[in-house]
Amino acid sequence: MENLVLHLDNIQKNFAGLRALADVNLHIEKGKTHAIIGPNGAGKSTLLNVCVGRLAPDSGKVIFDGDELTGLKPHEITQKGVARVFQTPEIFQELTLLENTMLPALSKRDGAFSFNPFRTMRSQTDINDEAQDILEDVGLAEQMKQIAGSLSRGDKRRLELAMCLILRPRLLLLDEPTAGMSRHDTNQTIELLNKIKKGGMTKIIIEHDMHVVFSLADKVSVLARGKIIASGLPEDVRGDPVVKEAYLGGAQE
């Protein structure tokens, strides 16, 4: 289908005989925000790891915009336009926010993420300007010269998001982007992600906070025991009795 950007076809993944993912089929539409929810241990992070090449599926295929990603290395998948914000922020603690934000773009321009300072000298000025603009977008411009290790958890997550956005991904994967945040920081992150949505970027979000899910998602899929048990519009999934029993516990937020 022309409007699909990602297709997961019968993905299976086992760990020491335990099935983490069982014949997962998932279709992600271009420009949409697709949330994947489910209880702890359902296989959600494993699924994202398969998408970005950190784990190889035992069987099945990952198709991104018509190209098969299965078997590619993580940096090769990033080069194709897929970026991921991790559950635990992966930033360079000893660098400034500006340096952190610039580094992915500098590395990408050198090809295969091999840093070459002589090639990047010619492009550093425009990347610097772009990094400052992105830090402004995520609310960190005033701290751009601060060392990243001194940031709060919420600001570290925003910094990692900036590091992904400078890569200009076509597909952004977010693993619990508001975990550990205050409600104020969570609401700011929701506002930011909705702003990104208006730019047409496709997003997959794993999130336990139902307020976040139903504030952002165009579609929701529920993963339980490694299987997709429901998929549809947020209001339909919210009212599904199977979902309530498996995950929401009948509670509605």
Image (tube, grey):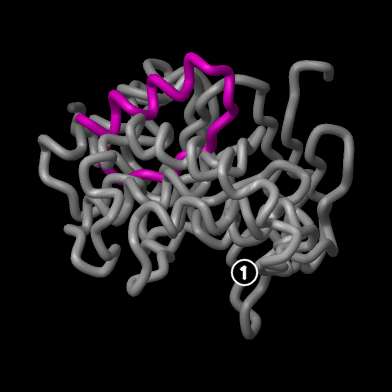
What residue is drawn where x is 24% and y is 58%? 146
* Residue 36 visible (yes or no): no
* Residue 232 visible (yes or no): yes
Query: Magenta region: which residues?
Result: 188-209
**Who is closer to the viewer here, 169 or 237?**
169
Give the vertical position of 95 relative to 87 (above or below): below
Q: Position of residue 237 (x, y in %)?
A: 42, 25
Give the vertical position of 83 relative to 225 (above or below): above
Q: Position of residue 19 (x, y in %)?
A: 62, 69
What residue is drawn where x is 46% and y is 46%? 174
Q: Position of residue 235 (x, y in %)?
A: 37, 16
Question: In the picture, residue 116 is in which quadrant?
Answer: bottom right
Determine which residue is flagged by label 1: 19
Instruction: State the quadrant of the N terminus.
Output: top right
* Left or right: residue 77 compared with residue 204: right
* Left or right: residue 243 compared with residue 103: left
What residue is drawn where x is 28% and y is 55%? 145
Instruction: Give the residue at the far right of this rendering.
Output: 67
- Residue 249 among magenta residues: no
**Who is closer to the viewer here, 87 or 185?**
185
What residue is drawn where x is 46% and y is 51%? 101
**Who is closer to the viewer here, 206 or 86?**
86
Q: Residues within 10 Å of mark 1 (few under 14, many from 20)?
A: some
User: What is the total number of numbered labels drawn onto the structure image?
Assistant: 1
Name the secondary structure under disc 1. Answer: strand
Instruction: State the quadrant of the C terminus.
Output: top left
Q: Position of residue 38 (x, y in %)?
A: 41, 47
Residue type at mark 1 is Arg
* Left or right: residue 216 compared with residue 6: left
